[in-house]
Image (tube, rainbow, N blue to C red):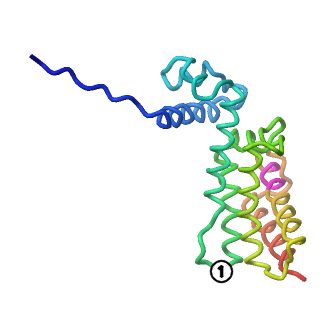
Amino acid sequence: MVDSPVRRRTASHEVSAALLRAAEIVLDRDGLGGVTVRAVADAAEVSPTSVYNRFHSKDGLTVALALRTLAQLGEVVDVPAGPAPRERLRQSCRNYREFALRHPARYALIFGAGSPLEDQSSEAAEAGRAVFTVLKGLIGDLAPVLDDGELPEAAQTVWAALHGSVTIEQAGIGQTPDADATFELVLDLVIRGVTTP
């Protein structure tokens, strides 16, 4: 008698992770408009029911994608301690730009019109605030004289400069010949701004 092989069930979190990886592939390839339950199921080589079982709807899938993207962005901007605070902030900002340019559809998902972050009471907005807290920490280390009221304003200003620079570059509408050099000048300005009393 031959023993039949034991089938191992895939853990639910592994299935969810695989579906999110497939959704990310679709998002990167086709943009947010291409992210449908059917397209993600096809990319993951499963039935649409599997997607519905994990995420309940296309909106649930979109929120999960936004959470995953925010986690990825949080990882790249959270530069470990070691370099001087000025260089840590500069590297964090460079990492932000690189992420946005490398993953424009993911960046648009979290910061474009209709983003899941628009609902400020949502889990996605909470994840966005966690990334913002990383930025506040980097600025606080660089400019410890800023008080609790000034720190969020300084971080918002730095973020606005980063987002504006990246958006101009992504749209191809910059008015200077060297985007890298311009971005470094932006960093000089924001660092000078947060460190000048």
Residue sitting nearer the eye, 122 or 196: 122
Q: Main secondary structure of the magenta part?
A: helix
Q: Quadrant of residue 176?
A: bottom right
Residue at position x 84%, y 54% in the image: 164
Q: Which residues are magenta?
A: 163-168
Quadrant in the picture for the C terminus: bottom right
Instruction: Please provide percent x and percent y for residue 65.
Output: 65, 38
Residue sitting nearer the eye, 142 or 7: 7
- Residue 109 placement, left or right of 55: right
Label 1 residue SS: loop
Q: Quadrant of residue 195?
A: bottom right
In reply to whether residue 5 is colored magenta, the answer given is no
Q: Mark 1, residues whose alpha carbon is within 10 Å: few (<14), some, or many (≥20)?
A: few
Quadrant in the picture for the N terminus: top left
Residue on which the image places disc 1: 84
Residue at position x 80%, y 40% in the image: 112
